[in-house]
Amino acid sequence: METITAELTTAQPREIALYEKTFCTLTEQAVIGDAARTLIVSGLG
């Protein structure tokens, strides 16, 4: 995976599962398209 300043390699199944869970949570919370535009324009984004 890449961070702002470096690239990290994660091979431990437990760590991979944690990143997968985090990614899924963030994906579910993401606002896209018109809803994102509305959020940004309203000043809450």
Image: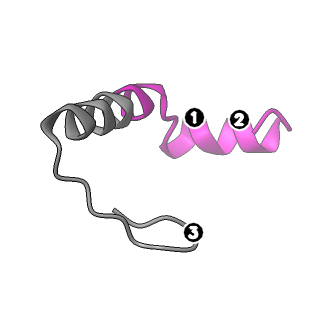
Q: Nearer the viewer, mark 3 or mark 1?
A: 3
Residue under pointer 1:
35
Q: Quadrant of residue 37?
A: top right
Q: Are marks 2 and 1 in contact (CB under 8 Å)?
A: yes
**Numbered range of the magenta stretch:** 25-45
Residue under pointer 2:
39
Residue density around tag 3, few if under 14, some if 14–19, many if 20 or more, within 10 Å: few
- The structure residue drawn at horizontal position 57% and vertical position 69%, both measured from the top left corner, is 4
Residue 17 image position (x, y, % from top left): 21, 32
Residue lying farthest front?
12
- The structure residue drawn at horizontal position 13% and vertical position 37%, both measured from the top left corner, is 13
Left or right of 45? Residue 26 is left
Residue 16 image position (x, y, % from top left): 22, 40
Measure the alpha-carbon separation of dots 3 and 1.
Answer: 27 Å
Residue density around tag 2, few if under 14, some if 14–19, many if 20 or more, within 10 Å: few
Q: Are marks 2 and 3 in contact (CB under 8 Å)?
A: no
- The structure residue drawn at horizontal position 48% and vertical position 34%, both measured from the top left corner, is 30
Left or right of 5? Residue 38 is right
- The structure residue drawn at horizontal position 25% and vertical position 54%, both measured from the top left corner, is 10
Q: Nearer the viewer, mark 2 or mark 3?
A: 3
Q: Quadrant of the C terminus?
A: top right
Q: Earlier in the sequence, mark 2 or mark 3?
A: 3
Measure the alpha-carbon separation of dots 2 and 1.
Answer: 6 Å
Residue density around tag 1, few if under 14, some if 14–19, many if 20 or more, within 10 Å: few
> Is 30 within the magenta?
yes
Left or right of 25? Residue 15 is left
Which numbered dot is residue 4? 3
Q: Is residue 12 above or below residue 17?
A: below
The amino acid on which the numbered mark 1 sits, given as a three-letter code, is Ala
